[in-house]
Every structure is written in structure tokens, then in C-alpha cells.
């Protein structure tokens, strides 16, 4: 099983010529030797170093206290997340499948192979507090690197050597805070020790084969020329939207491996962020160049539908499976629940496999690249430089749109046409909610008020739609099995229950609509 921890460290070129002074280091009561380790690591990457270009490293290490497979990915705050698996989970030439899944987005479907072999002598010094607890580790690393055949050649007429040797110092926090890191750095600078140009050993070994900063630990952003529009004005609705888009783009990248690995609720969360992006583009269309955003919205809609097939089955499983378990004895709850879960489980597995197949395709990778370009430099129009008044006009449009759609639905008698209209009203409320999120707290109380009131419409209408979907699913489940099955009566009870709360849900949404206008 993989273990995950957050790594906060800094790397410096060279080593101190004398022992580190601890007088100005917060909480540090003394130093203790940590011994010497001899580490042997092979790093894996695609032929064009796609992982390293995005601040990601994948290695197999032997020796030391943490031998195993290590995957390091960059965090938003400059930290790195390290996922570890034991050596037994892979082989010398083939990383564990779980780690390959976690690198699939960065590798863009390319296979990985060994690119660098590192041997390191690590001399450890521990900074400890009064109780002897380790606050930080200082590692003096003497490194010998050999570039392997799978690595790309250096550009230009001059090529870097295949063997590289250097000395560096790493400082990694254990129980200390970032103030300790800053204090250690100040001491290093007094001694002439500066940050390394490359923050990873792999980046150092492959210097000259990558652009500067490619392994700095952050996501590779597109250049300004890759998208239309200009930077958002400080304090403007455009700036608020840009920040929101960047949060959603980062969430999609984070959730990619979770969806591939079928982690709990991952499909649902990714679908929500896709909807948030689409809602933001639709709600802010007056400040965006739609010739740039409409094609992206089309692709987001496509991928949302892909996720929706798996997510809708999840909803059915949770709703009907739970209701079946609560049936009276005459409804044969165990048999009914088993039949529901067998039917929905098979459909979920099929839908999830289809989702993962899509996520290995060029169209999906192109979509995420487009989202990254959007977040890095949204195609803002001139009115994006306006302030809160523009944001509040957008909120008012979303409020009126939601109220209008719900009013149209409520004017119809119960039946299939009204179900469809209520579903449209629910989607309008969801867009209004996410649109309000996109400018909160920039737009102040009006945004927060709309967010809460739109949710008050969305939630009962969501429950109503779940009932509609439940009826459809139960009809399929019943028709797929033998008529004399012991669960048949239980399925009938469940079918009757799907709309038991329909009137209350519609009434609740109607009352929330009145508050929406207030």
C-alpha cells in the first residue's frame, strides 16, 4: 500500500566549509549526527522528459532508511508530495502500476524508461530541540550521476557529458516550521551557500537538456502568447475570475489520478469542477472572448458527460442500495439490495473503464492543456477591468435566469414535461451557485446570498431528479431479472417510494424561489 507525505525541503549548491552555527536557529538546541547513507537510485521519465518538465520525479531507490519507489509531485505552496511504495511492488525496469497511473497525466500517455542513474553518499546532520526531537535534517550529498540512453540528447553542437559529479546540501523539515528553513538559509548565505539552480538531482544531472526552471516544482504554464487576452486588472472582476479558474484547473489535475484509481467520490468531485468551469465561462461570457471559450466549453461538456455516466450510476447505487436495506421483511431487503448493487455495480465498472479509456486519449489531454492555458491567461475583454458593479450585474442575471426557469416548471402539471423543466431549473440554480462562488468574497454579501439561495433550490430539485432516475433504474432492474425472483416485490416497493417526497421537494424549491427574489 502506498504511503504519502508532504515534503518541504530546499537544495543548495555545494557544502558548508565549517559546522553550521545554531545560535540564530529558532527552537534548535543542538545538532546530532545522523550517520552516513549510500543511496542508489534510477530515475524514470518519458523520452522527452515530460515528468521532469512538470516538476515530477519517479525513482527506484535502494539503500538508506527509505528504500523503495518514490513519486514526487509539486504542491501549490512550494512543497512536494511524495508517494512511496515498497521495492517489491515493481521491478528494476518497470515501476509499479499505481505510480504509473499517478503519472499518466504528466506523461500524456507516453511510456517511461530509465533516464538517469544516481549514486549518492549522504552525510546527515540532525537539528534537534531541547527534548531531542528532530526539527530538520541537513544532508551533505556527494552525487555521481550517469545519463542513460533513454534520456534525450543535449541541444546544440555542444553536448553535456553522460557522467556528472557534484556536491549539494539539502535541508528538509521534520517537526520544524518554515521559519527554521528561512533561518538556516540565512546562515547558509552568510557562509556563501546559495540555492541550487535546479531543485532536484535529476534536473541537475540533465542540465542543458531542459529549459531553465523546468524542474522547479511547479506546473509548466503556457507562455503569454499562447492565449488571447491580457492580464487581469487588480481589484477587478477579471482578477476574481482568473483566480477562480486557476483553482478549478488545479483541482482537475489533482483529481486525475484519483479518478483513474477509482478512489471514493473522485468521479463526483472531478465532475463538480468541470461544471464549475463551465458555469464560470457561461456566467462571465460578457467579459470573455467567446471565440476562445466556446470551443473549450464544448469540450468540457463532452467530458462532463463522460464522467456523468459513472457518477449517475454511483448516485443510483447509494440511493437505491440504502433504501433496499431499509425495506420491511416482506420486501426481502437483503435480496433486493444485492440485486440493486449487482446491477448498478456492473454498470459502474463499465462506465468507469470507459472513463479511464477516455482519459488516456489525446482529446482529454488536449482539453486539460486548454484549461491550463485558460487559467494562465484568460481571454478577457475590456469590461473585465470593471469592479464589483460588473460582478453584481452578472449575479443578477443568474438570479433572474434561475427564477424564470423554475417559474416555467412550476406552471406545468406533474408529469414528464415538468420533470424535464425542473431538471433545467436545477441546472440553472447550480450555475448561479457556482457563478456566485467565482466572485466570492470579491462581490461581498450579494454573492454569498445568491450562493446560499441558489443552493436552496438546487438541493430539493436534485433530490427530485434522483427520484426520477431511481424510477428509470428500477424499471431496468426489474425487466432484467426473472419475474419470480424474491426481490421483485421489494423492487416494487422501492419504485413506489421514489416519488414519495416529490410534492414536498417541489414545494421546498418554490419557497426557495421566493427568497431568491428578495
Image (cartoon, rainbow, N blue to C red):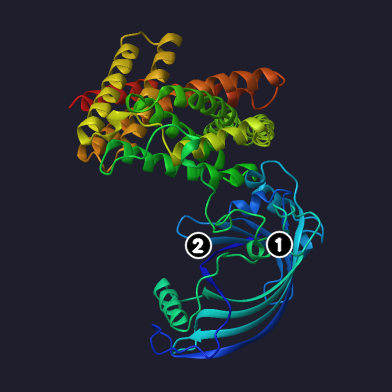
Q: Residues within 10 Å of mark 1 (few under 14, many from 20)?
A: many
Identify the residue at horizontal 70%, vertical 48% (top origin): 48
x, y percent for residue 180: 42, 77
Residue assigned mark 2: 79
Quarter of the image with the N terminus is: bottom right
CB under 8 Å between discs 2 and 1:
no
Residue situated furthest left in the rendering: 518
Between the C-alphas of marks 2 and 1, the distance is 18 Å
Q: In this view, does 349 lie to the left or right of 126?
A: right
Identify the residue at horizontal 53%, vertical 91% (top origin): 18
Residue 293 in sight from this viewpoint? yes
Q: Is residue 337 left or right of residue 177?
A: right
Identify the residue at horizontal 58%, vertical 29% (top origin): 331
Q: How crowded is mark 2: few (under 14 residues within 10 Å), some or many (20 or more)?
A: some
x, y percent for residue 392: 23, 31
In this rendering, the answer to whether 92 lies above or below 191 is above
Residue 501 in sight from this viewpoint? no
x, y percent for residue 383: 28, 29
Seen from the viewer's position, the closer of residues 131 and 510 is 131
In this rendering, the answer to whether 354 lies above or below 64 is above
What SS does tag 1 mark?
A: strand
Q: Splitting the image into 4 quarters, where does residue 60 fall? A: bottom right
What SS does tag 2 mark?
A: loop
Residue assigned mark 1: 59
Amino acid at each position: 500500500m502506498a504511503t504519502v507525505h508532504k515534503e518541504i525541503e530546499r537544495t543548495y549548491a555545494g557544502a558548508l566549509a565549517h559546522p553550521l552555527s545554531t545560535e540564530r536557529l529558532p527552537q534548535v538546541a543542538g545538532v546530532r549526527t545522523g550517520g552516513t547513507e549510500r543511496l542508489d537510485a534510477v530515475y524514470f521519465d518519458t523520452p522527452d522528459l515530460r515528468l521532469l518538465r512538470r516538476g515530477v520525479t519517479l525513482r527506484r531507490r535502494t539503500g538508506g532508511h527509505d528504500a523503495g519507489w518514490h513519486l514526487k509531485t509539486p504542491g501549490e505552496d512550494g512543497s512536494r508530495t511524495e508517494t512511496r511504495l515498497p521495492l517489491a511492488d515493481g521491478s528494476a525496469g518497470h515501476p509499479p502500476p499505481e505510480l504509473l497511473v499517478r503519472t499518466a497525466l504528466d506523461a500524456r500517455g507516453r511510456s517511461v524508461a530509465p533516464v538517469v542513474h544516481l549514486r549518492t553518499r549522504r552525510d546527515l546532520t540532525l537539528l534537534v530541540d531541547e527534548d531531542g526531537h528532530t526539527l530538520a535534517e541537513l544532508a551533505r550529498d556527494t552525487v555521481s550521476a550517469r545519463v542513460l540512453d533513454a534520456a534525450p540528447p543535449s541541444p546544440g553542437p555542444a553536448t553535456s557529458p553522460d557522467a556528472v559529479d557534484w556536491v549539494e546540501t539539502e535541508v528538509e523539515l521534520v517537526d520544524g516550521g518554515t521559519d527554521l528553513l528561512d533561518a538556516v538559509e540565512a546562515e547558509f548565505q552568510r557562509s556563501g551557500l546559495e540555492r541550487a539552480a535546479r531543485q532536484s538531482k535529476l534536473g541537475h544531472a540533465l542540465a542543458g537538456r531542459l529549459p531553465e526552471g523546468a524542474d522547479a516544482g511547479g506546473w509548466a504554464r503556457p507562455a503569454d502568447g499562447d492565449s488571447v487576452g491580457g492580464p487581469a486588472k487588480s481589484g477587478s472582476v477579471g482578477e476574481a475570475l482568473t483566480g477562480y479558474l486557476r483553482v478549478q484547473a488545479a483541482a482537475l489535475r489533482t483529481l486525475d489520478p484519483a479518478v483513474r484509481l477509482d478512489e471514493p467520490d473522485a468521479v463526483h468531485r472531478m465532475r463538480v469542477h468541470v461544471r464549475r468551469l463551465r458555469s464560470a465561462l457561461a456566467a462571465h461570457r460578457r467579459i470573455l472572448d467567446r471565440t476562445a471559450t466556446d470551443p473549450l466549453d464544448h469540450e468540457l461538456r463532452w467530458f462532463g458527460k463522460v464522467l456523468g455516466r459513472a457518477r449517475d450510476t454511483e448516485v443510483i447505487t447509494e440511493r437505491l442500495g440504502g433504501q433496499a436495506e431499509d425495506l420491511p421483511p416482506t420486501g426481502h431487503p437483503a435480496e433486493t439490495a444485492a440485486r440493486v448493487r449487482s446491477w448498478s455495480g456492473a454498470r459502474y465498472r463499465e462506465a468507469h473503464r470507459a472513463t479511464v479509456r477516455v482519459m488516456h486519449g489525446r482529446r482529454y489531454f488536449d482539453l486539460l492543456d486548454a484549461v491550463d492555458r485558460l487559467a494562465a491567461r484568460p481571454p478577457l475583454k475590456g469590461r473585465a477591468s470593471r469592479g464589483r458593479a460588473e460582478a453584481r450585474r452578472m449575479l443578477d442575471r443568474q438570479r433572474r435566469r434561475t427564477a424564470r426557469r423554475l417559474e416555467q416548471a412550476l406552471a406545468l402539471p406533474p408529469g414528464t414535461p415538468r420533470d424535464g423543466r425542473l431538471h433545467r431549473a436545477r441546472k440553472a440554480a447550480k450555475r448561479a451557485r457556482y457563478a456566485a462562488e467565482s466572485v466570492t468574497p470579491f462581490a461581498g454579501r450579494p454573492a454569498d446570498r445568491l450562493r446560499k439561495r441558489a443552493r436552496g433550490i438546487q438541493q430539493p430539485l436534485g433530490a427530485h431528479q434522483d427520484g426520477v432516475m431511481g424510477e428509470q433504474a428500477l424499471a431496468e432492474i426489474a425487466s432484467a431479472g426473472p419475474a419470480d425472483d424474491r426481490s421483485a416485490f421489494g423492487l416494487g416497493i422501492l419504485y413506489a417510494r421514489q416519488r414519495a417526497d416529490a410534492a414536498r421537494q417541489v414545494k421546498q424549491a418554490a419557497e426557495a424561489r421566493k427568497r431568491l427574489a428578495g
